[in-house]
Amino acid sequence: MSQSKTIGLVVLAIGSILLFFAWRASQAPVDQISEALTGRFTENTMLYLVSGLIGIVAGIALLLRGR
């Protein structure tokens, strides 16, 4: 397995974990109240969500780069 594929798998796994944390954070009562009042999630939840999506896209790109 090449180095870029290994790094791609690691980045993909980290992105998935961050998306899981974003989902868990969005279900918290404080985040639910914040979203109900402002229409947006809290800063930390958005950070997890954006970082997770970037990680997944970058991981898939690294995995497909070798093909």
Image (cartoon, rainbow, N blue to C red):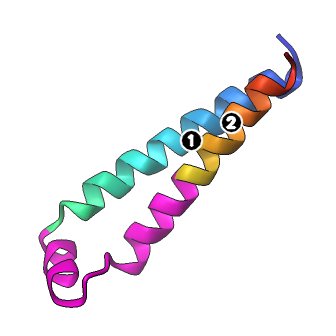
41 in relation to 58, above or below: below
56 in relation to 52, above or below: above
Closer to the observer: label 1 or label 2?
2
Q: CA distance from mark 1 to mark 2?
A: 9 Å
Q: Is residue 50 magenta?
A: yes
Q: Position of residue 41 (x, y in %)?
A: 31, 75
Which residue is depicted at the point 62% across and 47% down?
55
Which residue is depicted at the point 16% across and 89% down?
37
Name the image quarter holding residue 3: top right
The residue under label 1 is 14
Q: Position of residue 20 (x, y in %)?
A: 37, 46
Residue 40 falls left or right of residue 32: right
Which residue is depicted at the point 31% across and 80% down?
40
Q: Considering the image in quadrants, where does the N terminus appear?
A: top right
Q: Amino acid at mark 2?
A: Gly
Mark 1 is surrounded, within 10 Å at the Cα level, by few (under 14), some (14 to 19) or many (20 or more) other residues, namely some
Q: Amino acid at mark 1?
A: Ile
Which residue is depicted at the point 87% across and 20% down?
66
Mark 2 is surrounded, within 10 Å at the Cα level, by few (under 14), some (14 to 19) or many (20 or more) other residues, namely many
* Label 1–label 2 contact, CB within 8 A: yes
Residue 19 falls left or right of residue 67: left
Q: Position of residue 43 (x, y in %)?
A: 42, 79
Which secondary structure, mark 1? helix
The residue under label 2 is 59
Start-end of magenta stretch = 29-52
16 in relation to 7, above or below: below
